[in-house]
């Protein structure tokens, strides 16, 4: 009985001290760390979209294998460090397999949202694998080959050496003289047993293959230029035609190679198409009553949420109206005026801009619109911009912008005017391609990208003759630019194959080199200075590409050629107009963006796509059907506009005018009274 109390005291002491008492606090600390990490991850992903976006951009779906490896490593180092150190080769092998899995995920692009830009492996996956596919596979093979060398250099080196020895033995066996002699005898024996047939003609009498068809392009003399459309059979032949295409681009882009320039060096007097060929704009009656009522609704909605604002003014465009919101005041009693607050000795502070921006969804609900857009600061004004769809939208016709004074001024100065549309104030948005000097257009399918390309081409056809302008059109789909196939401005018929464009691109680079030599010989700096003193004018060359993604997938040589043209083409009159419906980082590369400062974004699928085009968000909230954001050197922020609508009938009339030009009517001088 005497030993029982001692045993009970020893048992109680064991529960309160010793090793058992030191384990529980550590376990509690481990659990606390796990909970804190889980809460931090949940808060970061749930309340901070930037953190969530950054995490997805970094690894994408590859967080699963990476997370499993990290969790196993941390748990092993925490509870079984000796096991981890003793079997370190297992962990290195697991890390290598994880890296290979991340690289394999980078090969998959679902084609929507952020996954289209960073793939399933994220930006880290693109570094491990990524595009192009051959280089990515080579990286993964290198990881798989080098991992055994790191783990066991001697064993791996011996096995690799034996493998190379076997390969060398096989090559030497094939190259052995006796083997070659046996193969030669076998072939002779087979040839001697060939069944009798028609006598083979001697080499000198062998039938001669028919000559290859001439390139489907021909130059006519005089004032007529004919573009012969290639047949599908000729499109299938790649080699000779590509070579002829490169030479043809160089030949037809050379000075004096244009049918619109006479033998004396004077340009033909063919008239330009009149604006009357374009459709007249639809009549529209503007009324500010609905917009005033909308402004009152905005003030009331924000006031009901405790945000005091005042609508100072509004500017209405074809599709969008922008309200200028003046933040109100906080402080004082019952929203008293500034004079009353000063008399009572109170203090007031302005409503924070962030408080206004946070009410976007509430305003969208009150205004019954699925899409609205805030502008934190209207350039040149101390107001917050709120862009809302107008109650009665209207179309912007090409004729409205062409007849504007800005368009005529650029054309009179010898530039390349582009009738883009109307801005948010309803004023004409006209660009001069010679000062841009290149243009990048991007947007999802059906948002107005191809219509914008038609507006660009139509604007150029209205102001330049074939002697002043040459076009090189690339349409991989073969349906968007087909309406312009017959115009005499084409350098070559519309290109529909990436291999043919690669050949034409080489020709353009050669033309660029020749033109720089001509400028150096003339002692001038650019095409304007050359044309001011030359007898034969140097025409502008505009390259128009409808789908850039199809070309960029063909290889790096096309990207390098386009970047070089973008860097050096402005001075000698070569300009690029590139369009794509897939604005991802592998299509709109950093080198291309750095040399094309003017970009147009139509509606895109995600904020990531908007950042690729504009380096800013906003294009994902556009309305579609010609609603666009324009980024150029005139403003550090993208500005909104509505693109022009060009109908097929207008294109047909323009093309018909240039195919069958009519002489300018001769006007007799009026008799003096």
Image (spheres, rainbow, N blue to C red):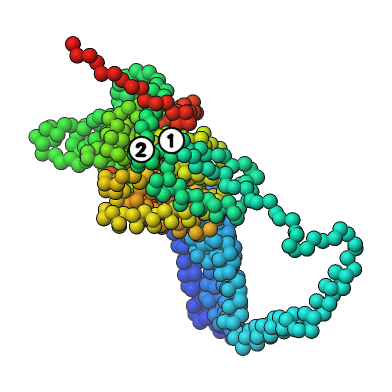
Tell me the residue at 47%/39% (across/down): 221
| SS category of the residue bearing label 1 | loop
Dividing the picture into quadrants, the one containing residue 314 is top left
Q: Which residue is mark 1?
A: 223
| Label 2 or label 1, whichever comes before in sequence order | 1
Element carrying mark 2: loop
Q: Is residue 31 above or below residue 430?
A: below
Q: Is residue 300 left or right of residue 600?
A: left
Residue, x 11% and y 32% (percent of image)? 339
Q: Position of residue 333 (x, y in %)?
A: 19, 34
Q: Which residue was labeled with disc 2?
A: 267
Instruction: Characterize the local packing of mark 1: few (<14), some (14-19) or many (20 or more) Cα atoms within 10 angstroms.
Output: some
| Distance (Cα) linking label 2 and label 1 | 10 Å
Q: Nearer the viewer, residue 307 or 132?
A: 132
Direction from residue 622 to residue 201 in the image, left or right: right
Query: Which of the two residues, 496 or 550, is positioned nearer the viewer here?
Result: 496
Q: Which mark is residue 561?
A: none
């Amino acid at each position: 009985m005497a030993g029982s109390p001692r045993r009970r005291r020893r048992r109680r002491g064991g529960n309160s001290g010793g090793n058992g008492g030191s384990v529980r606090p550590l376990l509690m600390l481990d659990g606390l760390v796990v909970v804190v990490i889980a809460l931090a991850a949940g808060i970061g992903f749930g309340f901070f979209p930037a953190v969530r976006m950054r995490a997805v951009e970094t690894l994408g779906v590859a967080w699963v294998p990476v997370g499993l490896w990290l969790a196993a490593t941390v748990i092993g180092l925490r509870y079984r460090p000796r096991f981890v150190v003793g079997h370190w080769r297992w962990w290195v092998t697991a890390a290598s397999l994880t890296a290979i899995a991340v690289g394999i995920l980078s090969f998959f692009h679902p084609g929507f949202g952020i996954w289209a830009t960073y793939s399933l492996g994220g930006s880290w996956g693109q570094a491990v694998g990524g595009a192009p596919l051959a280089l990515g596979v080579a990286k993964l093979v290198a990881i798989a080959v080098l991992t055994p060398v790191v783990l066991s250099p001697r064993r791996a080196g011996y096995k690799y050496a034996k493998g190379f020895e076997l390969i060398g033995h096989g090559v030497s066996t094939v190259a052995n003289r006796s083997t070659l002699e046996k193969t030669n005898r076998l072939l002779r024996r087979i040839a001697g047993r060939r069944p009798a047939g028609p006598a083979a003609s001697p080499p000198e009498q062998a039938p001669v293959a028919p000559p290859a068809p001439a390139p489907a392009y021909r130059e006519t003399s005089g004032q007529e230029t004919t573009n012969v459309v290639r047949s599908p059979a000729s499109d299938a032949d790649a080699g000779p035609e590509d070579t002829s295409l490169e030479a043809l681009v160089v030949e037809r882009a050379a000075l004096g190679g244009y049918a619109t320039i006479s033998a004396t060096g004077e340009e033909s007097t063919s008239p330009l198409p009149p604006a009357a060929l374009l459709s007249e704009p639809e009549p529209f009656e503007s009324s500010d009553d609905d917009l005033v009522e909308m402004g009152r609704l905005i003030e009331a909605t924000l006031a009901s949420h405790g945000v005091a604002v005042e609508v100072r003014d509004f500017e209405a465009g074809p599709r969008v109206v922008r309200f200028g919101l003046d933040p109100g005041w906080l402080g004082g009693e019952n929203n008293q005026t500034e004079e009353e607050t000063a008399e009572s000795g109170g203090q007031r502070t302005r409503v924070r801009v962030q408080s206004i921006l946070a009410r976007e969804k509430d305003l969208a609900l009150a205004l019954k619109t699925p899409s609205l857009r805030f502008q934190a600061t209207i350039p040149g004004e101390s107001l917050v911009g709120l862009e809302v769809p107008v109650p009665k939208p209207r179309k912007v016709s090409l004729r409205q912008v062409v007849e504007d004074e800005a368009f005529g001024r650029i054309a009179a100065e010898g530039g390349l005017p582009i009738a883009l549309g109307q801005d948010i104030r309803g004023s004409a948005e006209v660009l001069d391609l010679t000062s841009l000097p290149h243009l990048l257009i991007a947007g999802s399918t059906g948002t107005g990208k191809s219509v914008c390309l038609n507006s660009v081409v139509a604007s150029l056809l209205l102001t330049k003759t074939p002697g002043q302008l040459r076009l090189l059109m690339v349409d991989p789909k073969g349906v968007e630019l087909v309406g312009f196939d017959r115009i005499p401005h084409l350098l070559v018929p519309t290109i529909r194959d990436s291999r043919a464009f690669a050949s034409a691109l080489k020709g353009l680079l050669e033309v660029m080199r020749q033109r720089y030599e001509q400028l150096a010989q003339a002692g001038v700096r650019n095409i304007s200075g050359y044309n001011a003193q030359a007898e034969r004018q140097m025409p502008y060359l505009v390259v128009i590409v409808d789908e850039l993604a199809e070309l960029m997938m063909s290889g790096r040589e096309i990207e390098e050629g386009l970047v070089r043209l973008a860097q050096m083409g402005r001075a000698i009159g070569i300009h690029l107009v590139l369009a794509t419906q897939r604005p991802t980082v592998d299509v709109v590369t950093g080198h291309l963006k750095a040399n094309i400062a003017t970009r147009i974004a139509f509606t895109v699928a995600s904020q990531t796509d908007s950042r690729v085009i504009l380096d800013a968000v906003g294009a994902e909230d556009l309305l579609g059907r010609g609603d666009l954001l324009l980024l150029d050197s005139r403003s550090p922020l993208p500005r909104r506009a509505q693109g022009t609508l060009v109908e097929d009938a207008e294109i047909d009339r323009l093309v018909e005018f240039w195919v069958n030009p009519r002489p300018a009517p001769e006007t007799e001088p009026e008799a003096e009274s």
